[in-house]
Image (tube, rainbow, N blue to C red):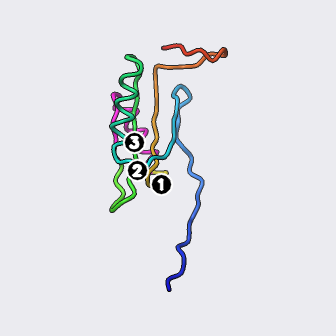
Amino acid sequence: MSSPAQIERQAVAVEKPEELNLVVGQSHFIKTVKDLHEALAGAVPQLRFGVAFCESSGRRPVRRSGNDSELGELATGNALAIGAGHSFIVFLRGIAADAGDEWSFA
């Protein structure tokens, strides 16, 4: 009988410039990157975004997408630092909430 695997936990700092919005989540579906891309691209025409998704199989590649290469690089770098399978990170630019919780677009 094999012994249970040990789980190692680490705190990972996320590199996030002040002017960007950030979404971190988890999904078991490999089409997550495509689904997130389509949802974001269709939501607000002027929204700029970068998405990265950590797979959990094999070499655990990071899939990426978006319409802003800088945000894509930032998402990918942070996803690699986090390294948790089935996790995703999204950086957004061009949308902000004011104090009244109504959305405005930059």
Foreground pick, 18 / 55:
55
Residue 54 disc label: 2
Q: In the rendered structure, which segment of residues is drawn in magenta?
A: 63-80
Mark closest to the chain's N terminus, 1 or 3 = 3
Amino acid type for the residue under numbered disc 3: Ala
Q: Are marks 2 and 1 in contact (CB under 8 Å)?
A: yes
Task: State the residue at coordinates (39%, 42%).
Answer: 52
Q: Give the main secondary structure, helix, strand or loop, of the magenta stretch.
A: helix
Q: Is residue 39 above or below residue 87?
A: above
| Distance Cα–Cα, label 2 vs label 1 | 6 Å
Q: Total label count?
A: 3
Label 1: which secondary element: loop
Find the residue positioned furthest to the right: 99
Return the x and y of residue 95 as percentages of the image width and height. 50, 20
Amino acid type for the residue under numbered disc 1: Ala
In this figure, which residue is indicated by the disc labeled 1? 84
Horizontally, is 16 left or right of 85 in the view? right
Q: Is residue 29 above or below residue 17?
A: below
Task: State the residue at coordinates (34%, 32%).
Answer: 69
| Distance Cα–Cα, label 1 vs label 3 | 12 Å
Horizontally, is 100 left or right of 106 in the view? right
Label 2: which secondary element: strand
